[in-house]
Image (cartoon, coloured by chain):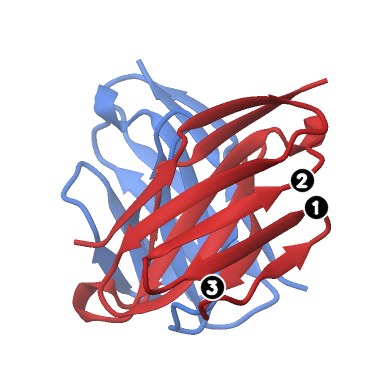
Chain colours: A red, B blue
Amino acid sequence: EDKVVQSPLSLVVHEGDTVTLNCSYEVTNFRSLLWYKQEKKAPTFLFMLTSSGIEKKSGRLSSILDKKELFSILNITATQTGDSAIYLCAVGGAGGTSYGKLTFGQGTILTVHP
Amino acid sequence: SQTIHQWPATLVQPVGSPLSLECTVEGTSNPNLYWYRQAAGRGLQLLFYSVGIGQISSEVPQNLSASRPQDRQFILSSKKLLLSDSGFYLCAWSTGFSISEKLFFGSGTQLSVL
């Protein structure tokens, strides 16, 4: 069974801090790893990673994938209160019953205080 | 551009009553459609997915069912709600049957069964 584990489950920081969110996975025939941000309702897409060692960057957010060690990290530098959200990691596999579906981790709740 | 509509946003139902949540997608053809449930502030659990009209795959045995009567319409139903059906339900779509594609989510339905 495919499995995605995120850590920490929750994190409280102050504005300006840098945070690192972790995602480890076990999946049949890995295809892609995705990060989503969920502020209130609909999760919104941040990154999709398919290759090891290639950093994806968007403003203060960046992410990288290690397919050998089966994990990814999401970094947020100079955090702002608007970064407060649940960050979801999801992994897609291509084998057997995994085909065509994403398995989500339990999420990291990030709270940024002014 | 593509948009996804999900309604209602909030629903309070008594135990034993029926349920019907609807999701429609605009601006694309033959999307893959998904229903997810999210426990309070946590990760997403895949309930059903569909790759075409009338084609439904169930991920977990439960009190719910799904139907896809039209290409861009996905319905989540129950004949008799249980307390354990309470939760936040998200509809999502992706283009084509490829897990490398990212999901686009609706705004969700908060269901409370009392």
Is the residue marked by circle 1 packed among few (<14), some (14-19), or many (20+) residues within 10 Å? few
| Residue receiving disc 1 | A60
- Residue at left offset 68%, top offset 26%: A13
Say which quadrant the C terminus of chain B sits in: top left
- Residue at left offset 54%, top offset 77%: B101
- B56 displayed left or right of B26: left
| Residue receiving disc 2 | A77
Tell me how far mark 3 sits from mark 1, CA to CA: 27 Å
Q: Is residue A42 visible?
A: no
Q: SS class of the residue under badge 1?
A: loop
Q: Chain of mark 1?
A: A
Q: Is residue A71 above or below residue B1?
A: above
Q: SS class of the residue under badge 2?
A: loop
Return the x and y of residue B85 as percentages of the image width and height. 31, 32
- A16 displayed left or right of A48: right
- Amino acid at dot 3: Ser
Pointers 1 and 2 in contact (CB under 8 A)?
yes
Marks 1 and 2 on same chain = yes
Q: Is residue A98 visible?
A: yes
Q: Chain of mark 2?
A: A
- Residue at left offset 82%, top offset 34%: A80
Is the residue marked by circle 2 packed among few (<14), some (14-19), or many (20+) residues within 10 Å? some
- Amino acid at dot 1: Arg
- Residue at left offset 74%, top offset 65%: A57
Tag of residue B94: 3
